[in-house]
Amino acid sequence: MRRYRCTDCGVTRTVVPRGVVKAYRYTLAAIALALTYWAVWRWPQDRARERVSPWPVVGSAEPHRWRSLRRWASRARELFGLDDIALHGSARLIARRVTKLLAGRGPPDGTELDRVFAGAHVRGRTSST
């Protein structure tokens, strides 16, 4: 994160890399990959967390659960700019649909994860129609 101050008026601007979301500890790409592991690849929550999270400490109350996955699925419309898409069903079904839409935004070549990763950074409509 970089901060810049205007030499004329003194206003400060903060500039962050693309994909960083305010008030989230993860980038859009990391969120998209975690949702893919959990919803598409059907990995258990703790395995997805091990793969994506840089933090080795896990809550002792529920070490096999990652609550963020469900929260991210419920907020996917605003996170990934899917305002024109109807998303309903369980959190895992929503996450699966979202990751497929993100993969569709990515380049046609590459693996599914490559397409989801790239598609997480594309905002706006998911189709060319």
Image: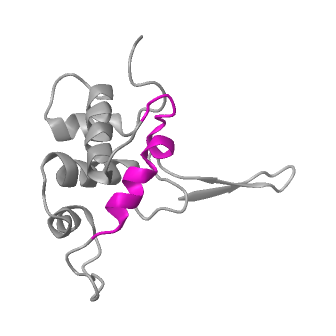
Query: Magenta span has 116?
Result: no
Front-most of 121 and 73? 73
Residue 97 visible here: yes
Query: Magenta span has 75?
Result: yes
Name the residue at the front extreme: 89
Compared across the picture, whether 126 is left or right of 106 comes to: right
Residue 27 visible here: no
Question: What's the residue at 33%, 48% (across, down)?
Answer: 29
Residue 69 pos. (x, y %) = 32, 60
Compared across the picture, whether 101 is left or right of 47 comes to: right
Residue 118 pos. (x, y %) = 31, 36
Number of numbered discs visible in the structure rendering = 0
Residue 128 pos. (x, y %) = 40, 13
Name the residue at the right extreme: 9
Front-most of 119 and 89? 89
Q: Can you tell which quarter of the image residue 45 is in? A: bottom left
Question: What's the residue at 51%, 43% (across, down)?
Answer: 78
Where 82 falls versus 109 (above or below)? below
Question: What's the residue at 46%, 50% (across, down)?
Answer: 75
Name the residue at the top extreme: 129
Where 84 falls versus 12 (above or below)? above
* Scheme of colours in the image: one colour
Q: Can you tell which quarter of the image residue 126 is in? A: top left
Quarter holding the C terminus is top left
Residue 92 pos. (x, y %) = 26, 51
Q: Where does the magenta region start and end?
A: 66-86
Name the residue at the bottom extreme: 60
Compared across the picture, whether 64 is left or right of 26 comes to: left
Where 14 falls versus 118 (above or below)? below
Compared across the picture, whether 78 is left or right of 94 comes to: right
Question: What's the residue at 12%, 49% (across, down)?
Answer: 41
